Image (cartoon, helix red, strand yellow):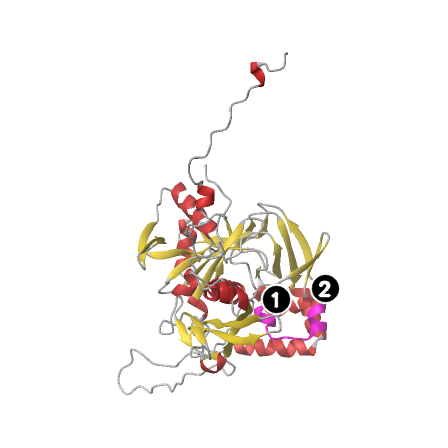
Amino acid sequence: MTVGSSQDVRPEPPRQSSLSTAAARNLATTAKSAPQMQEITSRWLLRMLPWVETQGGAYRVNRRLTYTVGDGTVEFVQDGAQVRVIPRELGELALLRGFDDVDVLTALADRCVQHDFRAGETLVERGAPADKLHLIAHGRVNRTSVGSYGDAVALDVIADGDHFGENTLLDEDSRWDHTATAETSGTLLTLSRSDFAAVLSTAPTLRTHVDAFSTLSQQRQNHRGEAEIAMSAGHRGEHELPGAFVDYELKPREYELSVAQTILRVHTRVADLYNGPMDQTKEQLRLTIEALRERQEHELINNREFGLLHNADFKQRIQPHSGPPTPDDMDELLCRRRGTKFFLAHPRTIAAIGRGFNARGVYPDHVDLGGQQVPAWRGVPILPCSKIPVTKEKTSSILAMRTGEENQGVIGLRQTGLPDEYEPGLSVRFMGLDEKAITSYLVSTYYSAAILVPDAVGVLENVQIAHWPR
């Protein structure tokens, strides 16, 4: 190739004839959004709860005296393939509620025998002699009986931590009034009547407690376990009327306000020089408050002291009959209380509800809630709440609740009129400047929730949300 060949000649780039857009932007005003935040959710629970003023930082729930001691969930420990009941957890049984002699409880726990069952196995047969308490460590058990017309009747489904057959420990003539069949494989522990009697004969403290329990169970009470109010009806003439009074619990529960706090720090240079067109302190505070409100709703659901999931009455907890949520499960949850205001479920659970309904050819209706259309079942809104946990096994819970003091439901607790109050129940206090010219603000919100009567909240537990009907 020779020098000066035409192949070495390259075209010159076109000369710029006007100001470039990149340079022009240096003189232009930029349109910008306020700071965005992915953590913000709809927070339906905070919007739907009626908030009650709580002076003094505490709310006392006075109830009518209840004789029933209730049934709790029993917890276990696992060592390889061996499963043991935690001795103190036996105190969750109605028979042993309030009994705190650890040595005796340990003796009872040591006599529990492990039994691993398989899916489809019959654990107890209706009509057979009953002489064992069954504690379910893991697995699902379906209990059925026979109806008035000889057909099979489904009673309930029980799972991890549940138990049955407690009455057999004291009743020598008892027989099973139902059949218990394992739906899945699992493990349970049994305590026989003879082993319980052996411990009872050597433990005076347990004998005293059992005698007191027997006396308590003989007290006249209504179907809710409350002390009965004596009255007469349908009589004629000069019938002597019974005297009555309404007794109260001597030690009512008190809910103390919980707190969520953080310290917001803003450098004075930022607040002074970079404060337009948006107020930096105001935007920082806005996003901080959003995060606090999200944490507040999380605590109202999951806090062990007052959270709805942990404080729902054990008798108001039910299991789905087949795993995925069905219309039958929703009806079972709905029928356990009057005046249910709304359902609360994780968004993925709501999707599973829709799949289960569609598979049956059932389509939930929608209701208007504050100008927004939300799905509903039997006219009761189904509201999303991402704070309800989803386990690694892809199970979750559905809550149903009645709200309001006048309805003896669930209420939110807060105190307003706080010093430097920014929103109801939330204060922003100036804490001063430090030697680095950083301004600090203490942001605090005080809250709690109270369940006025046990049936105000119901929970459908262990709902399978990863099932896809075919």
Which quadrant of the rendered structure holds the C terminus?
top left
Q: Which numbered disc covers residue 404?
A: none
Q: Which numbered disc flags the more N-terminal residue, 2 or 1? A: 2
Could you say which disc has been placed on residue 169 in the image?
A: 1
Magenta-drawn stretch contains 94: yes
Element under label 1? helix
The answer, for residue 318, to whether it is visible in the render is yes
Q: Amino acid at mark 1?
A: Leu
- Foreground pick, 77 / 385: 385
Kindly report the distance in space between the C-alpha atoms of the residues bearing marks 2 and 1: 16 Å
Q: Which residue is mark 2?
A: 110
- Residue stretch rendered in magenta on the structure: 93-106
Q: Is residue 212 left or right of residue 348?
A: right
| Residue at image point 44% right, 83% down | 247
Is there any visible trace of residue 69 in the rendered image? no
Residue 397 in the image, given as x and y percentages of width and height: 49, 56
110 and 373: which is toward the camera = 373
